[in-house]
Amino acid sequence: MTAASVTVRMYNVGFGDSFVVTLTQDDRVWRMLVDCGVHWQGQARPIAETVQAIIADLKAASPDGVPRLDVVAATHHHADHIAGFARDEWEQVEVSQVWLPFVEDGSDPTAVALRTRQELTAHRLLGLMSNHPALGASRGTASFKAAQEFAVNSSRNAEAADRLLGRRGRRFATVPTIRFLPSLTPAENRISVGGRGATVHVLGPSRDPAELKLMDPPANVAWLRLDAGDPEASDLAAVEPLFDDDYIVADPRRLSPDLKRARGSLRFTLDEQLLAASSLLERAVNNTSLFFVLEVFGTRFVFPGDAQHGAWQHVLGDPQGRKLLAGAAFYKVGHHGSHNATPKQFVEEIWRNGGYAMLPYGLVERWKKTIPKPELLAALSAHEHPLVRADQPEAVTPQVTVHEDLWTEISFEVEEDRPPPGFVSDADAPAVPAADTAGATGASPS
Amino acid sequence: MAGPAGGPFGAWVLWGDPLEWDLELFRSAGSNELESWPVGEGRRAAAMAVGDPVVLVLTGEQDDPAPGLWGVGRVTGRARSGRPDQFWRERAKRRTLVGVEMVVERVLLGISDLARVEVLAASELVVRPPGGEPGVLTSAQWTALRDLVQGVAVASSGAGRVWNRPPLSLPMRRLLRTYAFDPTSTRLSGEYLIVDVPFEASLRPGPMGELVQVVDFDATRKCWYEPVDLNDPTILARGGLRPAEHDPRTHQQVVYAVSMSVLERFERFAGRRFRWRGTERLKLVPHAFDGRNAFFDAASNAVMFGYYRATRDDLGEHLPGQRIFTCLSSDIIAHEVTHAIMHRWRPCFSEATNPDVFAWHEAFADLVALFQHFVHFDVVRAAVASSAGDLRKSTGLLDLAREFGSSTGRGAALRSALEAERSPAAFRAATEPHQRGAFFVAAVFEAFVTMHQRAIGDLIRIATGGSGVLPPGQLQSDLVNRVTKEAVMVADTLLGVVVRAFDYLPDVDVTFGDVVRAIVTADHLLYPDDGGRLRGTLVEAMRARGIYPEGVTSLADDALMWPAPDRPLSLRDAEPPIDLSRLIVSATLNLDASGRAAWAMGSEGGTPLGDRKRDRDEEQERYTSLNIWARRNAVELGLEPTQPIAVVGVHVAYRQAQDRQPHPEIVIQFRQRRLDLEDPNLSADDRVQVKAGTTLIAGVDGQVLHVVVKPLPFTSQTLEGLEHHDLGLSHHRAGSRRLSAMRSWLGQLDADDALTAWTGEPAALRLDFAALHADPPAWEVSR
């Protein structure tokens, strides 16, 4: 018999993530929003429209017309995942809990140091790109622009972060409990949600000190340092002459044509290196992604955020983690379908055929050849995973509902007595009910 | 061609009117070299050939400039349309120009002096031919003129030469000064070192010589720094400028001196002339940018040196805020120039096809830079003296290695490798190129110390009356001198062994195992007995660190040497035949120190060697023959017979052998790109190229001695024909192993690279020396 139904609704923001997961058991409803943001390129519509649509849908679903969410999960600090939270419309929404990766925890010195490094690096990169004299020749190239986009994506999300953390007057309608995950206490990484039989397993990001370096930003762009050690990095405008005026050629026309020719053949551009450094930063932030699996009577929904190769290895290296992934009914395709965000091993060896894949994606011209990665799409198809794309909404099975180009939804009916595939026995370590957490406020709605 | 007065051709005469060409502007621009000159469009202009002697006559009514002969030089480019230099009043107009190489500084001979010489009075030197055509001197006229101006054009300055008759020959060496080994180090021999390099008579301001060109442009501050003219008598007289941090000209001198010194050592060890591709020079940019890095940029064949301010967390002994110039560190210069030389010899070693390729680049560059310290007797002597009674342990020499690059933060990997336990595990675990390479350098250094101890054993016994136990306190100074001499000799020998091995390396995808095999093969050919146990010592030092070829059954010479061909293989069998003798003769002439032998042979022996066009044609024929030969023997060479094979290098090297005789050898490299084995999802330009390469060592009789293969699997079509071809099948198996190892390594690079998420470009294509030399290395960060 049907014990519960789960719907996953993907809002079509463009190049960004925004998902609402609704778990209905008997007449109890539990609802979670996973991310709400879009990259500044590849937008399907302004993010405000998506925010308004989500809230309108929440209102419509609410018996008393007040929009409510049990959980808001923000997987990581990138614009394409959290930009939407900067909108003040969220003040109408009652939120019980906010889940964030542990790196956002302001009371954890390791996390603070890490986040500070990431923020400082983004800031320095943008600073370099806007005013470093050596970069004149690099400006305007495609690589330079891409580098700038990466740095922007990692910074200027302060307003959104403020709302999630309840800082500087930004808030939701209620004051939610904030959980920084995963917790150092293993039991707290299995969270009971909704009614019986539903658990969220938090699998990442890793808190293993050895793996924290996956989240470390780059220390330099080619010869320019980005870390705090370089006094000149912060004082780029003050360029004093290197030698006395007498040694500086006043009129370069005097120089022999040979010298001028030679100078012409030199390459002083830094755009490639800027791009490399910016992409390291991008990856470092992606690797802070909250990686979790929602399990409802053994049916599993995988939300990896934008975890990249290294961060995935942490999950795949754990036998429990592998088991949880193996029989997933649903997988949110990591990082808009890029190369390093869905391990080949996961698709080829671990994930059993047939589960749904949802791809949050909007066309960004610059990356159109590589994102989504054609090999990934081919592999998903070869393993019979129905693929639902935000940019090409299509009801590929009767379970899929397409609502214009605003959202696409997959509905799952979950049976209680169905033997969960690759079952991870909950008896080993009972899940902690969400409401039991110290300081939890507000009852779950409905 | 014949001149108007009859007789064979002697030289061309270019004419100029100071009203049209502004000599004053030319002089005030600080230049004294002419690069082109307009000529008419007639037959004469068209006949001007590269290398022809040419002179310049300026006309005019006034005494300033004085009319007369102003320059003697040679033609460097045939007549073609172009814009004249900026000193022409009508510079916008296109004209027919010839390329010339000529110094124009002052009048050499006045027109009235010329007119007074009987042979020249009616020549086209005095009487301008009509129609703007260049004049022609007969051979007799040219000889007479040459006698008059002898020596004038060679050395560019100094009024004294008028009196130095007969003319003095140019010096062989130029003395210059550098820091020992950078401004802030507390080195053993005082602040400065004297470096002597070959005397380039034609050295121009920059300095710009035949091999290197210093380009002092600062991209951060967008300005040029005044170029130094090392031929200035005031500099010549004092043996080079004394290095000073505030004077950029001394920085230019330092980079020039150290680079030339390194290049010269390479020539000596390799036994052949070193040249960049074509007329290319290595560009050295001493103040390229504000930043803590220096690197070799292969695309522009340039070494870029940065400068930066020291911070509190810097290693070394500077003051916070002090400006550090990487171009003043001899270690950094030698290291980067070595990268450039390696790239010239083996361009494919800049492609990261396995974890050893870049590590070998770093190892070799560090090794050369480190052993460059041992060129300086005084430095080594001070190190030896400082080790006092503890000589047997050579701690002084070890200190020299430990100090390597210390004040600039370089060399940290080497220091840790010298301290690290000698164990294969550490080498296996090291993947970062500098770190991995440091194990190789540490092994060579250990061999050096061992060899040195062995070499001075008898000296110590003599000095101690046979006991071998040195008394405490200072060493006796004669003993210090002798021990130092041994150290310098051993260092030279050892570095020579490694540099010579370069010719024996495969063309692509090198590993440290290959390096060991190349060293053993090269050394065995010259010193079959290994009398000084040098080879054995070196191999043992490598073995202790796990550096040896995969799959060898023993570390004896026979097992380590590159295999000889299965069946006799000879270049003499080529069809059409390869003219090996001319190749050998031209290599021999190139070794002449004056560099003029080829030219002399050309004019006297009737064999126009040194004629560029003829050389090129011959080279082309040789390449064609070799290509056909290689295709016929492709399977033996580990190359796919059904696909194109490129001949990428043919040269002859002379090496000093055990018997003290020069030992000539032919080295040939073949390369083959295998499009069929590459990633078909990317366009041919965007892929990591999959290449097979073969190096061939042959005697001057054409007999192939060794074949060094880096094969790839054969196509199935070829494989069908190889059923009983043992060597072919073994190449095929080795090729399959290599291909799969390469693919998995490239996959790992992709997985480790953050940009892989965004672009289809393989990560390996983004690895270069600039990325590698960021400090801390970007490569390391990206891991």
Image (cartoon, grey):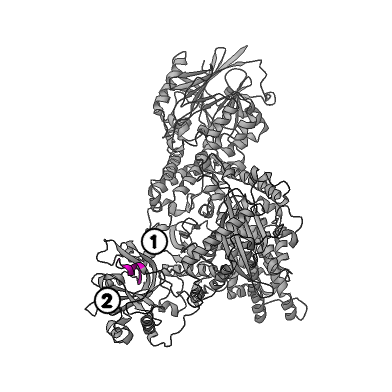
The answer to whether residue A443 shows anywhere in this view is no
Quick check: is B36 in the magenta stretch?
yes
**Chain designation of label 1:** A
- Asked whether the viewer can see residue A46, the reply is yes
Residue B281 magenta-highlighted: no
- Which mark lies nearer to you, 1 or 2? 2
Left or right: residue B582 compared with residue B59: right
Crowd around label 1: few <14 · some 14–19 · many ≥20 (10 Å): few
Label 2 belongs to which residue? B128
Q: Closest to the observer: B547 or A226?
A: B547
Verify CB contact (< 8 Å) between mark 1 and mark 2.
no
- Amino acid at pointer 2: Arg
Residue at image point 46% right, 33% down: A80
- Residue at figure coordinates x 41%, y 87% from the top left: B164
Vertical placement of residue A226 versus B580, above or below: above
Stretch of the chain drawn in magenta? B31-46
Q: Residue B565: x, y in percent?
A: 70, 58
In this figure, which residue is indicated by the disc labeled 1?
A261
Relative to A276, does residue B396 appear above or below in the rendering?
Answer: below
Q: Position of residue B636 (x, y in %)?
A: 67, 54
- In this picture, is B170 found above or below B499? below
